Amino acid sequence: MLRLLKASLFGALAAAAAPSLITGIFALSFLMDGDFDRAVYALLLPLFIAAPLVFVSAVALGLPAHILAQITGKQSLQAYTTAGCVLGGVIILVPILIATGSLEGAWICALGALCGGVTARTWWHDMPNHQVR
């Protein structure tokens, strides 16, 4: 469980990095107004949004992918990272397609792919002896 939390946290940090640059501007504005609480909230908001989404995605998609890799014997850093990137992008793409019916805004899938890749890579590196059969 700790390994899953660590991998999810690293993935969430990767996903929140770019949006935090934008909310960081708001945080600076709040700091200039003397509102420290709102500044901290604005800076951490992307992480608050990303963390539960990454964790749920890791449980719903990542763990079954891990079990499938174990069963098929296809465990490798490249396999895990590729699966993480693909699943991370798809988990963002599906709601976009459902909501809009088009690929407009699908560029954000790159953020999901980055997040999934980082989560999967962290998961791989934390496996004891990489559990390869």
Image (tube, rainbow, N blue to C red):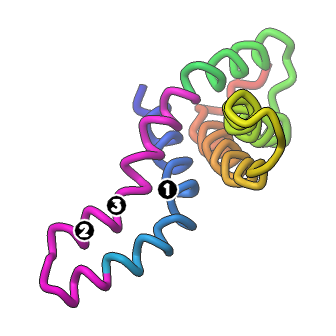
Which residue reaches farthest top?
Answer: 71
Secondary structure type for disc 1: helix
| Labelled pair 2, 1 in contact (Cβ < 8 Å) | no
Give the residue at x 59% y 32%.
128
Main SS of residues in magenta:
helix
Residue 4 percent coordinates (x, y): 49, 31
Which stretch did the figure color magenta? Answer: 28-57
Queried whether the magenta region covers residue 105, the answer comes back as: no
Q: Quadrant of residue 61?
A: top right
Residue 37 occupies quadrant = bottom left
Asked if disc 1 and disc 3 are in contact, CB closer than 8 Å, the reply is no
- Identify the residue at horizontal 50%, vertical 49% (top origin): 12
- Residue on which the image places disc 1: 13
Say which label, 2 or 1, has the lower sequence index. Answer: 1
Residue type, label 3: Leu
Please name the residue that numbered disc 3 is placed on.
44
Looking at the image, residue 86 lies above or below residue 70: below
- Tag 1: amino acid: Leu
Q: CA distance from mark 1 to mark 3?
A: 10 Å
* Disc 2 target residue: 40
On screen, residue 119 versus residue 50, left or right, reads right
Q: Point out the image quarter for the C terminus.
A: top right
Q: Nearer the viewer, residue 70 or 55?
A: 55
Distance from Cα at disc 2 to Cα at disc 1: 16 Å
